[in-house]
Image (tube, grey):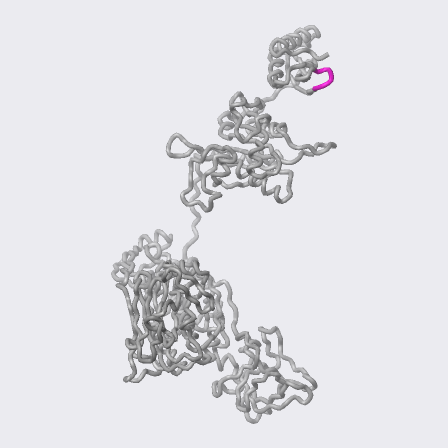
Amino acid sequence: MKASYRWLRALVPGLTASPAELAARFTAAGLEVEGVHVYGAASAACVVAKVLGKRPHPTKSGLNLVAIDRTGDPSSPPLEVVCGASNVPPPGGLVVLAPLGAHLPAKGVTIERRAIAGVTSEGMLCSESELGLSDDGEGILVLPAGSASPGALLADALPETHDTIYDINLTPNRPDGLGHVGLAREAAALYGLSWSLPEVKAPARLAPAGDPAIEALATVTVRDPERCPRYGAAAVTGVTIAPSPLWLRYRLAALGVRPISNVVDVTNLLLLEYGHPMHAFDLDRVRGEGGREVGDAGSHPIVVRRASEGESLTTLDGAPHELVTDDLVIADGGGAVALAGVMGGASSEITGATRRVLLECAYFEPRGIRRASRRHGLHTDSSHRFERGVDPDDSRAVLARAVSLLTELSGGAAVRGELHVEAPPAPQTVAQLRSGRMDALLGVHVPFEEALGILRRLGFTVRASDAHTAEVAVPAHRPDVTREVDLIEEVARVRGMDAIPVVLPRVRPSREDAPRETSARKARAAGVQLGLSEAVTYSFVSRASLEKLGAPPPSVVLKNPLSVEQEVMRTSLLPGLLDALSRARRHGERDVRLFTVGSIFLAGAGDLPDERLLFAAILAGERAPYLGKPEPVDAWDGKGLAEGFVRRMTGSAAIEVERFADATVPPHLHPRGAARVTLGGAPVGALGPLHPDVVDRFDLGAGAIVVEIDLAALDARGQKLPRYAPIPRFPATTRDLALVVSDDVPAGEVLAAVRHAAGALAAEVTLFDRFVGGAIPEGHRSLTFHVVYRAEGQTLTDAEVDAQHAKAVAAVAQRFGATLRG
């Protein structure tokens, strides 16, 4: 919304605040002024001059030497300027001179004495574009005769040429701010000034008593009172279509509206003044029944109705529209002539031949206007206001003001009477205001009479009140106020938010969620320590992503999701990570190391879901070994990540990673690489390569390794504190054991058997080599273990070590059929 500071000053006579002060006060009260600029800045430096004569330039064709009087003093010598405009008026005409030293911001120039084709020019005669008044640069600005005296500043002679314009960002709940009347009411309330609606003057001319009244010229029928509860019409005859006077043209131009003609400009002026759109029809082009011409003596029908399916309408912009039954139209006897509240039709627009004008001022239901505007792609100044809600009570004043202005500016005469079709008014909203509730909500005491005074200045009516309670009736121009808290907000913003003291709220940390938050913070720190980057993913995912992953079905479904991609609460952390991986690979990033910490929501025993806190990581691309060639990450990288994470979280070394039984492999993991992570024998997570089907469904392009750890399961195991172990006093004895076993025997089971059979003397058993081929039979492999024997309090003899080692060999040979590798 663009607003004129000069216009607001005229509407609020006692307003003395500067443009900057008023802008700051508006912003503090919730009407955010996003920008302030000066319209016609050059008019404060340019003066009115009178043409004394002109003659052709002696050497340059197309140029004239214009003698002007710039002071109005007969004793002052005339000034001569060079001018190339073709519309220099004859002697006595008034023009605008930019004297030496004047700056023209619109063109970014400062006027200096200069020689043009050998003749020195002492200034410049200006066009509207050079003055920053419009885009018209075809000729110089010629002022009406007698409108000013030579030597007067243009800003003083024609005040509308110099103004401060506000760009106000209005929220949709403040339709009253879409007109200068509403902004003036707001300014008066903010500065404690008395204010009343602008006085509407009587028409300059009335139609003779013998001329027909409005009832004989037109009829109004409203067939849909729900969508159009109020419709008013008035007429002016004998109009002459002409350009508007300069003051009106510049007032519109300053607010971004292109002047068209006196009739159309009046409707646009009232839209900007009251924020209530209206429309002007050429009465002689309004058709009668069957589309026939009515003539001067007939009555022109105006019908407000729903459109017929497929009915056509060509709007003022020349675009054809096919209407639907939900569209509300203004129709005559031949069909639709306007899309109600949005845009008029070309069939009855104002032209240079118009002599009789029918003015419309109505109230249309906002939701219907909003649907029609979006359906037809027509967002106009009219629809912008109607779809937010205009004041239904000001339609008579707007109509009377339009008739008055039109008779003044077009030479027309007002037709006697007006036509008004009005449904019963809706009950007025009444809200209670309590002093105690207001003080409690604002945190500061507000004198009750001061609060009621603020509301009265804003147009509210106090019906009944005592020292602490009042019944407040809400005016029609404030449809956003419906409750007591809205009244309190009005009082707070007018008094100023800075009048409310700043009090820091008491912080009460939640003890119940402290362990959970501690675990989450610790997990994030562990992930970063392991060289991963955290990915923050949404808790909302699509059903399709969970189905593609084979995750548990969702237990929490959103009733009003933002999109189909965020319709359920996740039952796995992997969809978000896989989306991040897919996005990274689309951007050419192949090596990805990501983790996330968050909750999943599984079906619970009762009404509430079972919320579990998990850690999930994904590894993709290649590892870069030291002094070696890059190799793709595999399940062993996932195993190392899982062990490192669990060890950092619990401090325990009792971590086991073992293969899943075939029937228990999670559906999103590859059966040949999936493994269960256990801690002290209890399962705490899973890892492995993604199943090829999952890779294809998520369009990842290549595989990846994923790790999932249940943080609640880790917390249940507790935190193991590190314990000091003394340095061994006696040396150890080592033996290497190379065993040939079948390929279907897990190496982990062999290692466990060796450790058990070697007994308490075996301090450490490590698998350090795997070999196939050569002398190893097909379907078998060689596993080599490094066994460290040590005893406390003595040095072991070779005989003791050999005896214990033989037991280990015999045990694995008996259990797995293992043989020693020669």
Residue beneath the point at 59% across and 43% down: 583
Was residue 341 drawn as part of the magenta stretch in this picture? no
Residue 795 position (above or below residue 229): above
User: Which residue is more in the foreground, 261 or 377?
Assistant: 377
Was residue 775 drawn as part of the magenta stretch in this picture? yes
x and y, in percent, of residue 572 in the image: 50, 34
Taking the image as shown, residue 536 lies to the left or right of residue 557, namely right
Which residue sits furthest bottom? 75
Q: Quadrant of residue 495?
A: bottom left
Q: Quadrant of residue 609?
A: top left
x and y, in percent, of residue 716 in the image: 49, 26
x and y, in percent, of residue 519 in the image: 51, 33
User: Which residue is more in the foreground, 220 or 110?
Assistant: 220
x and y, in percent, of residue 613 in the image: 49, 33
User: Which residue is more in the foreground, 273 or 302?
Assistant: 302
Residue 483 position (above or below residue 75): above
Q: Which residues are magenta?
A: 772-776
In the rendered image, the quadrant that contains the C terminus is: top right
Q: In this view of the protein, can residue 188 be seen by the observer?
A: no
Q: In this view of the protein, can residue 120 be seen by the observer?
A: yes
| Numbered disc total | 0
Taking the image as shown, residue 577 lies to the left or right of residue 799, namely left
